[in-house]
Image (spheres, rainbow, N blue to C red):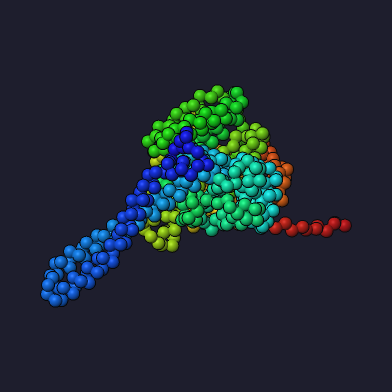
Amino acid sequence: MKPEKNFCPDRVLSYFRLEWLPLAFVTLSGLVYNIGLLATPWFEGRLAQCLADILSGSETAAQMALLVLAYILVTLLVQASRFIKRFYVRRFANNINRRMKGILYANLVRQSRAALEKEGYKVEILNNCGSEVAQLGLKYVHNDTCYPALLVIGQFLDALNSGRYDLNRTALLITQTGGGCRASNYIHLLRKALVKAGYPQIPVASLNFSGLEKDSGFQMTLPLARRALACVFYGDMLCALRNQVAPYEDEKGSADKMVDLWVERLGRVLLAGKGFTSKEMKHTFPLIAKDFASIPVTRVPKVKVGVVGEIYVKYSPLGNNDLQKFLESQDCEVNFPGLMGFVQYCIFNMGEDHVLYGGKLAMKMGTDQLLNWLDSVERSMLKAEADAGFYAPGPFKELVEKPEGIISLGAKMGEGWLLTAEMIELVQGGYGNIVCAQPFGCLPNHIVGKGMVNKIRALYPSANITPIDYDPSATKVNQENRIKLMLAVAKERLTTKADPAPVTAEELAGGAPQVETQVPAML
């Protein structure tokens, strides 16, 4: 659905002119449907008369069979027309809604904007940050609700309060994972907050793959899903390469300029309806890697830090108090495991449910095929990174095997076993200094994150992991001081190169009990 230059958003006829094709289908199918409804009583009368004639001997059973066949065909035509009419009525309504509503959505995945705009959505990504966002969230959401919900809702309300948007032409888009996490209820909390804040007219759409909020007004079409997946692949690659180049670049800002250049290029390509097939992605990956490899750098030893944690706090600068910028200010190379790992984790869990609990075999087979397709694209991306001289982690199918013996694949709440697997992947890849960012009170991630730290340290003595809690009551200074303590250990190891001693069973259990004894004095 491409916008036209002569489109007038304040004229009703403009919408009808642009949506003439759905309207034509609605009109024709409606006529067929209504005429078919009128034909139904006629057929019923004819069938009753034919039955009476057969009993009297003036008609044969063959005539009845023809009437029954005609009745069945007309009924099928009527039902098909009804389906077509309802389909195009909804399509017409959704297309009008896209043109009339600008969509605001949180700043988690920057690259997916082009995919949405290609589908006809007018999109603006929110970047409003600051303590006032959290305070606004606290005003309209109970403080027992997890930190990401406070920030997401506060960010939306702060944007609506800014006066920059036509509130009668604005909609909000929020993601839902559909798991046992409280994040699945964000959309209800947001709608309740909008009513409290005086914005009951603003609709909230849901972006999810779990069958939630089917009538939210946002259609996840197959082309949109394919473009969104391509954007995640491109975004992961750009972030990974940028983070490996920026700390060493000879001219500061070169890596960021290269990111902006490729974001603009890929946006143009996606808006043109290209660049999202596996063949096109596999062709583009080496070109991206080659451009980043051409940036002049001076490689010197630096502390390498990996970041894992709850999905929002891990990636969002608003959620983690701009953690990446802080780590880079401490002269570190930062590694954020890609978002595609979380996407594959969600898909994998749908199939794993069949293994653990039974259910539809078709779901398992479907998720396996989708994961195979994603794996082929991911391996091409990782190969392009490695061939250009950059660090590339293992693909998702190898990541699944890493937590074996540490945590069950049945641990699927929140980031589940994926968080543990990412920490192991980082340690094995040379990023043994890890910040585990998690919202305070997020029980699933405290278990799979902080709860696995001692076990990982026992298996990998070089692991230097510090869990950091994020909450409205937690100060940025305290969080950064804890990270600085972890970095102090990392810098000492960087200079000494000494292998840390393995953790003993007593230390793993919390240390041997210390008993204070007194030796009597000798007279």
Residue 396 seen in the current view: no
- Split into 4 quadrants, where in the image is the N terminus? top left
Q: Residue furthest right?
A: 523
Report whether 76 appears left or right of 248.
Answer: left
x, y (%) of residue 8?
50, 38
Q: Residue at x 65, y 53 (%)?
A: 198
Residue 285 at what x, y percent from top left?
A: 44, 33
Q: Residue furthest bottom?
A: 56
Q: Is residue 107 left or right of residue 37?
A: right
Q: Is residue 433 above or below residue 31?
A: above
Q: Is residue 303 above or below residue 397?
A: above
Q: Nearer the viewer, residue 382 or 263?
A: 263
> Which image quadrant for residue 68?
bottom left
Image spot of residue 204 (x, y percent): 55, 51
x 66%, y 53%: residue? 197
Q: Specify the quadrant that holds the C terminus.
A: bottom right
Residue at x-position 62% and y-position 55% = 195
